[in-house]
Structure formats: structure tokens, C-alpha cells
Image (spheres, rainbow, N blue to C red):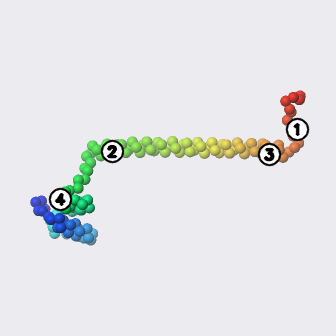
């Protein structure tokens, strides 16, 4: 590869366009014809898309260092663990609420069952009043 070869803005645009429209399997031929790497085309495409190709500036991509990646992975794992524990707590709360709701429903049904026969059946004597013995 010719590292010192300089291309004009128009040549860069033409090469990027030719590379983009080249069918799968023929992109290497475009690169070989111009004696450039795929990385160079990627940089030119990013500069073109950012509007920097004309000024000759390059688009800097953030490079993640292994230490930064490891720290981010560790942070994300802690976040996943925290969220999983939160989901477990939420499911337990939902189960507890469902159990309480079912118990309340059963108690209500029992009260209705106890009260309904008394009101329908008048054979029960009236409850004694507080003043009579």
C-alpha cells in the first residue's frame, strides 16, 4: 500500500462511492485498484458523512482501552445484578398481594355465607337486648 499517496476530495468521494455500490465480493477489487485499505475508505466515509472531507479533517472514533472496557463491563454487571434483585422483589410483592387478595375474597365469601342464611331464615330468635335478661 502506498502510504504517502494523496487523494483529492473528489477522488476520495469517487472511491467511497465506487466502494459503496460495489457488489458483495468485489469490494476488495475496488480497494486494490486504488491501492488503499478498507480502513481508509471507512475513515473517508465517516469524514464525508460528518461534512469534514472537504476540510481534510478526520473523524476521531473513541478508542476504548481495556481498562475502560473492563470498568464499564463491571459497572453493567453490577447494574444487571441490582435490576435482577429488584425484579425478584417485585415478583414477591406481587405474589404477596395476590395471596392477600385471594384471602380477602375468601373471607368476604365466608361472611356472606354466614350472613345470608340468617337474614333469609327468620327462625332465629332476636338477639337479646342489653337491658333484658
Q: Is residue 99 above or below residue 30?
A: above
- Farthest-out residue, left: 4
Tell whether label 1 touches label 2 (CB within 8 Å): no
Residue at disc 2, secondary structure: helix
Residue at disc 1, secondary structure: loop
Calculate the distance from the C-alpha at mark 4 to the C-alpha at mark 3: 90 Å
Q: Earlier in the sequence, mark 2 or mark 4?
A: 4
Q: Which residue is mark 4?
A: 56
Q: Position of residue 90 (x, y in %)?
A: 52, 44
Would you say 95 lies left or right of 58 here?
right
Q: Residue at x 49, y 45 (%)?
A: 87
Would you say 109 lies left or right of 76 here?
right
Q: Position of residue 30 (x, y in %)?
A: 19, 69
Between 127 and 73, the one lying in front of the other is 127
Tell whether label 1 touches label 4 (CB within 8 Å): no
Q: Which residue is mark 2?
A: 72
Kindly report which numbered mark, 4 or 3, lies closer to the viewer in this rendering: 4
Between 95 and 44, the one lying in front of the other is 44
Q: Residue at x 20, y 56 (%)?
A: 58
Q: Earlier in the sequence, mark 4 or mark 1?
A: 4
Calculate the distance from the C-alpha at mark 2 to the C-alpha at mark 1: 77 Å
Residue at disc 4, secondary structure: loop
Q: Position of residue 125 (x, y in %)?
A: 88, 38
Q: Quadrant of the N terminus?
A: bottom left
Q: Which residue is mark 3?
A: 116
Q: What is the number of the mark on residue 125?
A: 1
Q: Position of residue 9 (x, y in %)?
A: 17, 65
Kindly report which numbered mark, 2 or 4, lies closer to the viewer in this rendering: 4
Residue 104 visible in the displayed image: yes
Calculate the distance from the C-alpha at mark 2 to the C-alpha at mark 3: 65 Å
Q: Bin the neighbour count of mark 4 within 10 Å (Cα to Cα): few under 14, some 14-19, many 20 and up.
A: few
Q: Earlier in the sequence, mark 1 or mark 3?
A: 3
Amino acid at each position: 500500500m502506498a502510504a504517502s499517496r494523496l487523494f483529492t476530495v473528489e477522488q476520495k468521494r469517487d472511491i467511497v462511492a465506487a466502494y459503496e455500490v460495489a457488489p458483495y465480493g468485489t469490494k476488495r477489487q475496488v480497494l486494490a485498484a486504488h491501492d488503499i485499505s478498507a480502513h481508509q475508505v471507512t475513515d473517508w466515509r465517516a469524514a464525508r458523512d460528518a461534512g469534514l472531507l472537504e476540510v481534510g479533517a478526520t473523524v476521531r472514533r473513541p478508542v476504548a482501552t481495556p481498562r475502560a472496557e473492563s470498568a464499564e463491563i463491571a459497572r453493567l454487571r453490577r447494574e444487571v445484578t441490582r435490576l435482577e434483585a429488584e425484579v425478584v422483589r417485585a415478583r414477591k410483592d406481587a405474589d404477596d398481594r395476590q395471596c392477600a387478595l385471594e384471602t380477602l375474597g375468601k373471607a368476604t365469601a365466608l361472611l356472606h355465607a354466614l350472613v345470608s342464611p340468617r337474614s333469609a331464615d327468620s327462625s332465629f330468635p332476636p338477639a337479646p337486648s342489653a337491658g333484658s335478661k
